[in-house]
Each structure stands twice: as C-alpha cells, then as structure tokens.
Image (tube, helix red, strand yellow):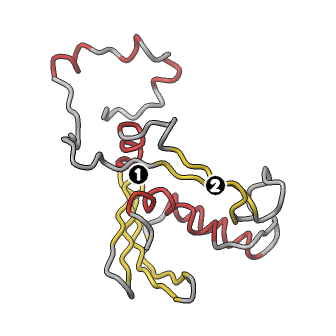
Amino acid sequence: MIPRRFALYLLPLVGLLASPPAGAGDPAHEWLMKMSRAARTLDYDGIFVYQHDTRLEAMRILHRLEKGGPQERLVALNGAAREIIRNEREVLWAIATRSQWDRDVMIFPGTRGGGLDPSTGIPGEGTSGCIDCTKPWGKPFEEVVNVDKEVYDRVQLEEYIPSDKLYKIPQERM
C-alpha cells in the first residue's frame, strides 16, 4: 500500500509510469494523448487494473471538473479497503503551506517513465519525485488560515502584481 503522504503526489504519474515509450503516430502515443486531454476536459467514471508485485489491483476512479480544478476519487475494489481523494486546490494549498523544499522534496533519478518526454536521455527512463506535505504529527495545525476581513480589504493586489499578469488570476481569491 502506498503511504498516504505519497498518494496525492504520485497519482498523476500513474498513467505515465505504466506506459511504454511511444512516439508520434504510434497508436499507443495517440491513446495516451487522448487520456491526457480527457483528464483536463472531461468528467469520467471507470475502473483501472494494475499489477503490484504478484497481485492484480483494481480501483474505481471518479473524475470531475470543478470550478477549483479537477477532483478525483479512487476506491479500492479488492484487497485492503482504501480510498484516495484528490482535489487540485487542496493539493496546491498543502504544497504551499506544509512543505519546506530543503527537506521535504525527494527526487528519484533513473525511474521508469513514459516515452512522451523528449528531455529524457534514455526512452522510458526519467526522474520521478514527490513532496512530503503531511500534517505535523501531534502538533496543533490549522486546516485553513483565514485572514481578518479588515486586512483582506486593505490589500490591493495591483500594488504587488503587474496589471498584465493580474487579469489572469481568477476573481475568487483564496
């Protein structure tokens, strides 16, 4: 079983780690590109099966696009009962508020990857990584830090962000 702290960050790599190298025009490459587009543009519900050591594992995946970004829910269909929920906004919040990059980033060179990345020297081999954004164990921890309304109203983003960049930020501020 994947430790909980890694599950959120390794999940987007599942498709790439299991795929063989493929080039443009290859049916496998086209299939992977369709999957990639679907992950960004469609709601879907399905089952995927993968091999872990000598066991076959089956999981149901539910994917939907929400205003705050994609959300996914994976439920184990066999083996130990487990569920993984991924909300892009919460993942980004966790990275921003629960990680110190000098100690919480792990890099794994020479790992198996997909053939879609032309920057790798050896097809099918690349570098993987993860960020440990687990909550501190046994210490007080605020799930969400709210800014006082008075302070929030005083902050003018225009003073910090150039206007040509500011218009790209969603109107809903975190």
Q: Which amino acid does label 1 sit on?
A: Glu
Q: Where is residue 69 in the image (x, y as percent from the top left)?
A: 41, 51
Q: Give the residue at mark 2.
A: 108
Question: Which of the image's four quarters has the N terminus?
Answer: bottom left
Q: Position of residue 172 (x, y in %)?
A: 31, 35
Is disc 1 placed on a helix, strand or loop?
helix
Q: In which quarter of the image is residue 31?
A: bottom right
Mark closer to the chain start, 2 or 1: 1
Nearer to us in this view, 163 or 115? 115
Residue under the image location 40 percent in, 49 percent down: 91
Q: Is residue 81 above or below residue 66?
A: below
Residue under the image location 33 percent in, 75 percent down: 82
Residue under the image location 30 percent in, 48 percent down: 135
Is disc 2 placed on a helix, strand or loop?
strand
Q: Where is residue 50 in the image (x, y as percent from the top left)?
A: 55, 82
Q: Count the marks: how many?
A: 2
Nearer to us in this view, 104 or 67? 104
Q: Give the residue at mark 1.
A: 88
Q: In this view, does 167 lie above or below 30?
A: above
Question: Is disc 2 surrounded by few (<14), some (14 to 19) or many (20+) residues within 10 Å?
Answer: few
Q: In which quarter of the image is residue 120?
A: bottom right
Residue 31 lies left or right of residue 133; in this view the side is: right
Q: Which amino acid does label 2 sit on?
A: Phe
Residue 20 lies left or right of residue 108; in this view the side is: right
Foreground disc of the pair 2, 1: 2
Q: In which quarter of the image is residue 141?
A: top left
Residue under the image location 33 percent in, 14 percent down: 156
